[in-house]
Image (cartoon, rainbow, N blue to C red):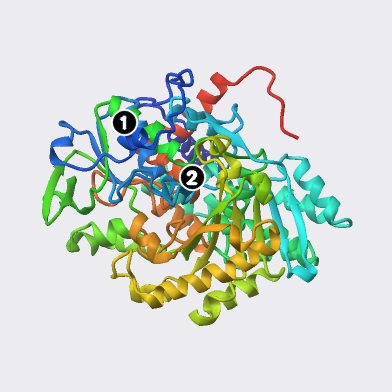
Amino acid sequence: MWITVTIIVASLIAVIFKYAFRRSGPNPFEIDTREPLKPMVTVKKEKNKVLKQGFLASKVPENLDAIVIGSGIGGLGVAVLLAKVGKRVLVLEQHDRAGGCCHTFSEKGYEFDVGIHYIGDLLEHKPFRCMVDQLTNGQLQWEPLDNPFDHVVLGPPENRRIYPIYSGTNRFPDELKKCFPGEGAAIDEYMRLIKKAGRGVWFLALLKLVPVPLAKFLVYTGLAGRLSSFFRMASHSVTEVVSELTENKDLRAVFSYSFGTYGNMPKDASFSMHSLLVCHYLTGAWYPKGGASEIAYHMIPIIEKAGGAVLVRAPVNRILFNDNKEAIGVSVMKGQEEVHVRAPMVISDAGIFNTYNQLLPKELQAMPAIQNQLGMMKHGEGGLSIFLGLTGTKEELGLKADNYWIFKENNIDELAETYMKGKREESVKNVPFVFVASPSAKDPTWEERSPGKSTLSLVSFAKYEWFEDWKNDKVTNRGAEYKNLKEILCDSILEVVTSVFPKITRDKVEYIDAGTPITNSHYIGCPKGEIYGADHGIARFSPECSATVRPRTPLKKLYLTGQDVFLCGFAGALAGALTCGSAILHRNLHLDAVAMANKTKPVNVKKLE
């Protein structure tokens, strides 16, 4: 009997290793493609020649290898990976500029980033930095944030506590211990659990790459949970874990504060997901020099060099299939006419709900395998953004290259639930938490580009249903009631911000506007205004869901990429692109990125303490 068990286990391990380390297809990371830095292009007109290439049938390249729907980082990422192995890829974007949540817009002389606030894990010798460098040929420059990079603000002005959050594997917990004397054991255990859960994330990628029967075997035998610390801890909420560590409510809040980076209140958030975000910033935080539009600007030429294109104002209204249920192209709306574009493969960065509910024929939507995936996922909460254009330099306004997470008090779950379940008219007057960042203070090129001006990006959450009545109105004219609702939101949040930043007075505000969930739906195509894609709650990270929602869909030649495939945010969507590329090219690109990082690693790299 033991011989049989040993043979079975050995065979299982062999199969897992085959897919974990397979490298049969072409490798996008085979050659270091970094080039000497070129002068940064700051003239908007020149950048728009790359970012705003409008769709025309005559611009579609011939003999396409793939079509990508959506130019977010998940779509551009997989397109560049394929371009690097000689594939001709067409990326189609419904907005008037490429980039998805990495795009920027300008109003009254101020440039605003819509989704990039800070990125972690970008030390030069790290695999993630190496991957980003290769996907931009080394042209994307990163500016480190200050340290502390985050500040957690708890309580009203008369009883306000501010806790600085430092990067550094040792400094992060050491500084927390200074703020919370007597809580050293709780902080050390928190760090141990965070690192333990984070180390097991490799199995998340593996479940999405191995054949479905093997993935199901790993899930239903319980082996996925036993082999991966990520899955062992995924079913525990952030609130559950931190409540067991300490009775100190401020420390619990500080342990939980970054839930806004994935969109679930701590009681509903998976501790494993939370762990990844904490680990992501342990080595520091960075911002793209020149602003978020630099990301797409340096990726698009790589796609074009391989014979592909990135075209905007190209809303895909359906995916085309043949009689064998194979994706063979897409239909693009050009005015009132459909333009059919053919390719042997279609990759969607439009999100799982848009892809399955909006772009598939009804008979394919009804397939049990499609409905099974949709049943495992739900929409994330709607995002709320407020954009401030201020007169004055960062020094005059007291702004630095850091972020503030402002909470009315330390009972985060209670505050969030009351707000999200409250009546619209009351909730918009009492937003209980807001993220505050100054893109202009983080970008060293800003002062030269926009002297005497500064910007603030304020982010929170709001129910899509609060604004749904106006979803079909013209985006620039949604009526007086909608405008009044936005003004109330702006006013209540601005009051909080000015109490934390005393040098920012209302007379300094030259421009202010709010982006609601229906704004997000219009510009970035998210069906319920969600900025992080599908919900990142506990259910999302069950082994079963992780193994089922994968790049290779139940329909032949149709793939998913981006946030819904892996995780949210810039790094998560890129990991989704890497996982999608792995499925298409039949090799583990995650390991290829690590190999490239090791090959290009500088000598005598010191660990950040």
Residue 276 shows in the view: yes
Q: Which residue occupies 64% across, 45% down?
A: 394
* Residue 201, percent from left and from top: 55, 45
Q: Which residue occupies 17% across, 36% down?
A: 60
Q: Which residue is mark 1?
A: 303
Name the residue nearer the viewer: 197 or 169.
169
Q: Which residue is mark 2?
A: 570
User: Which quadrant of the rendered structure holds the C terminus?
Assistant: top right
Q: Are marks 1 and 2 in contact (CB under 8 Å)?
A: no
In the image, is 580 to the left or to the right of 344?
Answer: right
Instruction: Say which label, 1 or 2, has the lower sequence index.
Output: 1
Name the residue nearer the viewer: 241 or 426.
426
* Residue 54, percent from left and from top: 23, 42
* Residue 336, percent from left and from top: 12, 57
* Residue 539, percent from left and from top: 50, 63
Three-letter amino acid code at the position of disc 2: Phe
465 w.r.t. 571: above or below:
below
Q: Quadrant of residue 578?
A: top left
